[in-house]
């Protein structure tokens, strides 16, 4: 791997793309979520011969994910025979920003995407007809420091902590956990930047006592620190601390998969293949990290496979259906909304948000 000064600028493009995972807070919903039409009484139902014809066969399926580790899941899914046997053309691409994704979904150019779960809720509460299919990544944030004297939450009192994306998920998760750990935000000097690379730069320059960073930025920071004799280390893995201070499992339901409602309603066999395929993709990544890193390298611009592989070892992939994950998702949304209700669009999404397999 090349020295820090030559490598770091090339990593910036990839790290900026990672803002899609944890820097995408939405505004208040402009429109209420779409509702399913009421059932027509049996006596008034249209005779079978006059009912609308079945949906046309699906000829193409377009998948999107941010330029970050979840893209590996969908890239692997796109090549699976269980999906290509149902749909002649399956394409995957990394999206650059959520505005692009939303526009593509509205015009039907993309049907399935990996997004932060709170982004899914925000889109739904704004009226975009999407369904949460599953949760696949369960926490990818760490608190890093290069100060050997900082060993606990108590040691962060009075310290300068750099955090990307004020009032977004890294900030809200960190403040929630810190408060429950006995260190309210008023007890620290919290400084906000617009992207994870800026927080990383402050840490490397000695201007930050600690920084909150997502994967794979956190892994890259540790590796770059070793190359430059800067003792960067992980102080906390926030999902572990989340579990400790809340008394729950050490998992945060951060990343999931959404599909447009038309695909869910008209092509349940495709959705079933997506669900089974992503379950297989999660297992494949866990069992084949080197191959997974190689698959991800073209989609994580600026990061090489060895760095990606190290990051995968620190990224908790776990497949749960939306129904299985709902309680954990709603707890997570509730905690985020205590500090910033608009991050989920002002309220918890209703039953229609969660794909049930029916």
Image: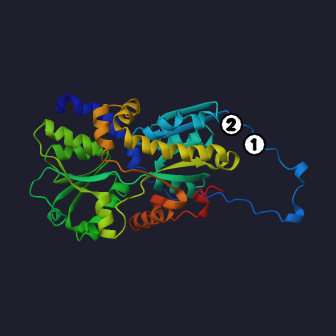
Helix, strand or loop under label 1: loop
What is the x, y in percent for residue 214? Answer: 31, 48
Instruction: Residue at 46%, 42% (x, y): give it.
Output: 281
Q: Residues within 10 Å of mark 2 (few under 14, many from 20)?
A: some
Res 293 → quadrant: top left
What is the x, y in percent for residue 163? Answer: 28, 53
Helix, strand or loop under label 2: loop
State whether residue 356 appears in this view.
yes
142 w.r.t. 13: above or below: below
What residue does disc 2 label?
58
The coloring applied to the image is: rainbow
Measured in 3D between alpha carbons, the distance from the residue under mark 2 to the one under mark 1, in whole angstroms, is 8 Å
What residue does disc 1 label?
55
State whether residue 97 appears in this view.
no
Q: Is residue 123 left or right of residue 232?
A: right
Q: Is residue 193 left or right of residue 106?
A: left
Residue 264: mark: none
Q: Say whether marks 2 and 1 touch (CB < 8 Å).
A: yes
């Amino acid at each position: 791997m090349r020295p820090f000064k030559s490598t770091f600028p090339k990593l910036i493009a990839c790290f900026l793309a990672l803002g899609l995972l944890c820097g995408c807070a939405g505004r208040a919903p402009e429109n209420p979520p779409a509702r399913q039409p009421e059932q027509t009484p049996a006596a008034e139902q249209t005779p079978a011969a006059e009912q609308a014809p079945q949906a046309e066969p699906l000829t193409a399926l377009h998948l999107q994910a941010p330029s970050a580790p979840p893209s590996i899941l969908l890239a692997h899914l796109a090549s699976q025979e269980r999906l290509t046997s149902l749909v002649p053309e399956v394409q995957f691409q990394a999206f650059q920003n959520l505005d692009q994704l939303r526009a593509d979904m509205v015009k039907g150019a993309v049907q399935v995407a990996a997004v932060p779960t709170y982004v899914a809720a925000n889109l739904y509460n704004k009226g975009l007809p999407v369904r949460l299919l599953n949760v696949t990544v369960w926490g990818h944030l760490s608190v890093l420091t290069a100060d050997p004297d900082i060993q606990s939450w108590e040691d962060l009192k009075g310290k300068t902590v750099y955090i990307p994306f004020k009032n977004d998920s890294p900030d809200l998760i960190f403040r929630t956990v810190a408060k429950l750990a006995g260190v309210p935000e008023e007890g620290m000097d919290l400084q906000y930047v617009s992207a994870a690379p800026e927080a990383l730069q402050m840490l490397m320059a000695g201007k930050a006592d600690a920084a909150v960073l997502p994967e794979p930025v956190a892994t890259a920071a540790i590796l770059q620190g070793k190359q430059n004799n800067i003792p960067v280390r992980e102080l906390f893995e926030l999902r572990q601390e989340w579990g400790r201070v809340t008394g729950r499992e050490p998992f945060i339901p951060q990343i999931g998969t959404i599909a447009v409602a038309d695909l869910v309603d008209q092509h349940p066999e495709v959705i079933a293949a997506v669900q089974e395929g992503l379950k297989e993709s999660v297992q494949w990544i866990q069992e084949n990290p080197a191959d997974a890193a190689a698959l991800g390298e073209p989609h994580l611009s600026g990061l090489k496979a060895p760095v990606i592989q190290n990051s995968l070892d620190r990224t908790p992939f776990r497949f749960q259906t939306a129904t299985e994950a709902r309680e954990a998702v709603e707890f997570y949304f509730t905690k985020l909304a205590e500090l910033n209700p608009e991050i989920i669009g002002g309220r918890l999404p209703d039953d229609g948000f969660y794909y049930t397999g029916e």
